[in-house]
Image (spheres, rainbow, N blue to C red):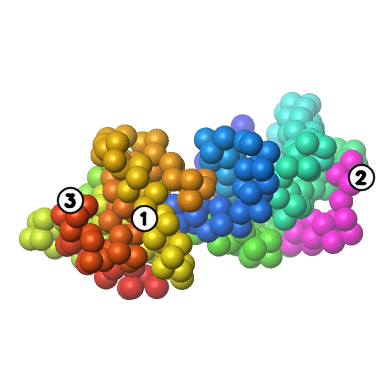
Amino acid sequence: MHELVHLDFVIEARKAELNELFISTPQHKAQFIKGLEPTIKKFHKLGISEASIAEYCTGLFEGMNRQMYNTPIDLFIENLLYTEYAELRPFQFLSLYTLIQEGLKAVTDEKSVELSPKDILSKSKVLNMVNAIQFKELFGIDLLNDFKATKDELKQAHEFYTEYLEYKDDKEPAEEYELVQHWAEDLKLDLYFELVSESEFRNKSSDIDQLLESIERDPFDLESNDPSREKDMDDFQKSQSAIGTNMAVVMFMVDALQYFDGMSKGKIKEIAYEIALQGTHGYRPDSKDYRISLIPGKLFSGYHILAYYYVSWMMALPDQVDKLGLNYGAEYEMAKHMKNKSA
């Protein structure tokens, strides 16, 4: 029932052409992981493997985004279910109580508190307490003290719930997305996703539609699409047949250029040498599990690592790029153009 109401909200928003898509890209993920560097260093000292660290970072990124997106919307859903489907209240009680207990354990468990980034843990706690405030309002059971929150965390949760109450009784289609955006900005989580108009996103030219479909079908771990670069993708689509560029490599090069932006030449050179050393064993474009120790928390596909290989050498050792045996000059020029236009 919860998910059906979620779908109903989307349908109503679509009818008014106001629905929004929640999109996160590799760039959003890279920015999130940069903030985890102290935790990653701690894990390295504890002897935790790179694979486990990467899995942890990805899980934290995806989990935080899911929580940020769902928490405001779920308040409206649970209120509607409580108000209009009284016969479901026993099930609703059990469901919400279980979810709150799971959230409580995630942010108060001794091991979680010890290992998790304090900033992320605090933000997750605030969002979990918002759910607890609603649970108290609906069923009269107060679980807030169990969260052992600070005054600031408790204040933030109550402020969020107060804002929700301003919308609760006369919510218009798609207004729930305003809360998602507002709360993310307040928690400084808005850097890790974008809310974009679904109607604009879906009604692009047929070339862009085909491009997006090809990206979704791409076997080289392209993850999500970044709608802010669609005009650049359109330019690329028109020119691709003429210049013979590899779309996957171009997109991964843009990612590499953004990652290396502002990094010292010496650091880029270290990464370039490590990629080259690993590459002595050969890189396979269809593989998806390459890791670079100097780029923690990132898992590379074959074309992804080749793009980083070429870009790192172009930025740190340009006079030796021809020795790599990678004929990616056209892709590199296109990627630089796209990166500069999106800056």
Q: Residue at x 48, y 51 (%)?
A: 294
Question: Amino acid under label 3?
Answer: Gly
Q: Does the magenta stretch include residue 157?
A: yes
Q: Do the residues labelled 1 and 3 touch (CB within 8 Å)?
A: no
| Residue type at tag 2 | Asn
Q: Residues within 10 Å of mark 1 (few under 14, many from 20)?
A: many
Residue corresponding to mark 2: 145
Instruction: Give the camera-side residue of 101 and 332.
Output: 332
Q: Which residue is under mark 1?
A: 272
Q: Quadrant of residue 313?
A: bottom left
Observer-nearest of 115 and 7: 115
Front residue of 330 and 158: 330
Chain part drawn in magenta = 145-163
Q: Quadrant of residue 308?
A: bottom left
- Mark pair 1, 2: CA separation: 51 Å
Give x and y (percent) for residue 72: 66, 52
Q: Are marks 2 and 3 in contact (CB under 8 Å)?
A: no
Position of 103 relative to 39 (above/below): above
* Circle 3 residue: 325
